[in-house]
Amino acid sequence: GAVVSQHPSRVICKSGTSVKIECRSLDFQATTMFWYRQFPKQSLMLMATSNEGSKATYEQGVEKDKFLINHASLTLSTLTVTSAHPEDSSFYICSATIAGGSTDTQYFGPGTRLTVL
Amino acid sequence: AQSVTQLDSHVSVSEGTPVLLRCNYSSSYSPSLFWYVQHPNKGLQLLLKYTSAATLVKGINGFEAEFKKSETSFHLTKPSAHMSDAAEYFCVFSGGYNKLIFGAGTRLAVHP
């Protein structure tokens, strides 16, 4: 149980294009979903927190107009990297907490490797 | 301030020998603590979680961790390492408001 999927697992795009990454909770409803970024050989950095039907809360230093987050349902959140540049290349990981479950236990997706040429 | 420190960036063990990954935390209140494992190019998998019930927490794949308040530690152990245990391990602190605070990670290498 508590499976989170991400699509795509890997994406390569040209500079200036936009890329959408989907995060789905497959067997539970997610109260809250989180988006993280991980640089090579580093830990995870929280980018934003989103609740279904509400605007996402972004961490300090994260551009909300560049990283658009939509949490349209209790099982789906999307992250759109707009006008991507090479410095946006990274490993993006989402996580979710279970509605009605422990609010501090997050279940992570397998991650999406974004490469911007 | 709340923080979590993983004391070793790299740990190398031989297959079949014990594993010890060290983690210390700093908190003004009783924390929720986690250990997650990440295999290359994969997401994070929850190994175990401490939430003030039993101080010795048993997780998946033979791992366990002991919460020691007096030492502000939450070290991860396994009696006998397998090759498949080679991965990155993160000690994580629940900082309130659903936010997780990650340690820097410990890369575990297992040699035949």
Image: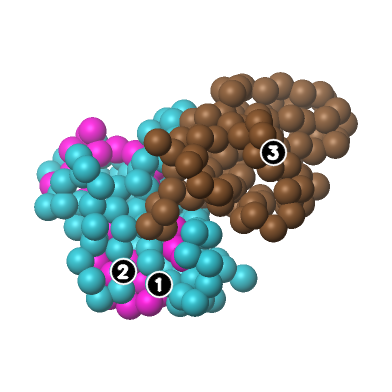
**In the image, which lettered chain appears brown?**
B
Decide: is A86 above or below A77.
above
Looking at the rendering, the stretch of residues picked out in magenta corresponds to: A70-97
| Residue A62, horizontal then vertical, whole percent | 21, 44
Q: Where is residue B83 in the image (x, y as percent from the top left)?
A: 77, 35
Which of labels 2 and 3 is toward the front?
Answer: 3
Q: Residue A51 carries which label?
A: 2
Q: How crowded is mark 3: few (under 14 residues within 10 Å), some or many (20 or more)?
A: few
Residue found 46% across the figure and 75% down from its top: A99
- x and y percent of residue A86 in the render? 22, 34
Q: Give the residue at x 62% y 70%.
A: A1
**Residue, disc 3:** B68
Residue indicated by mark 1:
A31
The answer to whether tags 2 and 3 share a subunit is no
Amino acid bearing label 1: Thr
**Residue type at tag 2:** Asn
Decide: marks 2, 1 in contact (CB < 8 A)?
yes
